[in-house]
Image (cartoon, grey):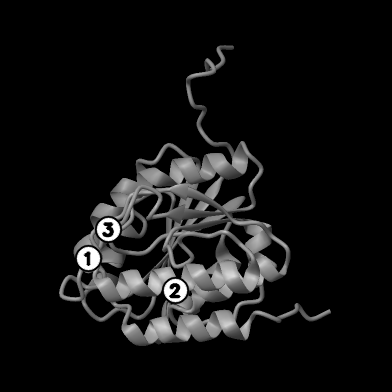
Amino acid sequence: MSHPTPDEPTLPTGTLTVLMPVYNERATLKGLIERILSVPVPKEVLIVDDASTDGTRDLLRDEIEGRCPGVRVLYLDRNGGKGAAIRAGLPHVRGDYVVIQDGDLEYDPADIVHMMRCVTHDGAVIVYGNRFAHGWPPMRWPNRAINVILAGMVRWLYGAPLDDEATGYKLFRRDVLLSIPLRCRRFEFCPEVTAKALRLGHSIVEVPISYTSRTHAEGKKIRWTDGVVAIWTLLRYRFWRPAR
């Protein structure tokens, strides 16, 4: 049996669930799924449709569900937000690891390979994709400011040297993620899972990823008010302790 040379990177081991909460992403969803399925990692894709109204649900039923091996779809009856969709999907994951994947094209699924290597070869249990490792990508200044604030709060409140707390690419060992009691409904998933993971004593490793921001006109849903909620969430859970 051949073995990779020291200069040849090995592919990650272990199975992965790509957990994708989606709401009104008909324009990008099919192309995104094709890119995810091409990633050379043993995986399943679990899509949670958060009661879409733009035809996303029809696309899933007519062109994806039952036609794309390894893709499962969970349909929610009422729109609850990204956090609620993630929570609804967690009991259904089957992989050894779970990565959260937004339904747009801001994040490149090819970066999943680098994140998986970090857990399967280096022993990390939580990996965040760092959008800012090689400088700032094009981004509106309010978004840039809130990212700086949130990362600074994590360093100050939790002592964790994170550069990109609010990244949409978060990968967990499944048992670790399932052990975190989440209450989030919307975009406060990110600060809540970060805060509680750190309070539980887990370390978070960052790896560089690429990022292409989209505008609100193109479908971006997060608002400035979600930044305020994220700040409050980090403050709120600073002294959180799991129930015994």
Indicate the secondary structure of the residue bearing disc 3: loop
The residue mark sitting in front, 1 or 3, is: 1
For residue 23, which quarter of the picture?
bottom left
C-alpha span from label 1 to label 3:
8 Å
Within 10 angstroms of label 3, few (less than 14), some, or many (20 or more) residues?
some
Coordinates of residue 84 in the picture (x, y in percent): 49, 80
Compared to residue 73, the image places residue 129 above or below, namely above
Name the residue type under label 2: Ile
Compared to residue 223, the image places residue 39 above or below, namely above
* Disc marking residue 149: 2
Cβ atoms under marks 1 and 3 closer than 8 Å:
yes
The residue mark sitting in front, 1 or 2, is: 2
Indicate the secondary structure of the residue bearing disc 1: loop
Name the residue type under label 1: Arg
Q: Residue furthest top?
A: 1
Residue drawn 64% across the image and 70% down it: 158
Horizontal arrangement in the rendering, residue 165 relative to residue 198 (left or right):
left
Name the residue type under label 3: Leu
Work out whether mark 3 precedes mark 2 in sequence or the reverse, and give the earlier one. 3
Indicate the secondary structure of the residue bearing disc 2: helix
C-alpha span from label 3 to label 2:
25 Å
Compared to residue 95, the image places residue 29 above or below, namely below
Coordinates of residue 35 in the picture (x, y in percent): 31, 47
Q: Which residue is mark 3?
A: 105
Residue drawn 25% across the image and 65% down it: 139
Q: Dividing the image into 4 quarters, which one contains the N terminus?
A: top right
Q: Which residue is mark 1?
A: 214
Residue drawn 54% across the image and 83% down it: 233
Work out whether mark 1 precedes mark 3 in sequence or the reverse, and give the earlier one. 3
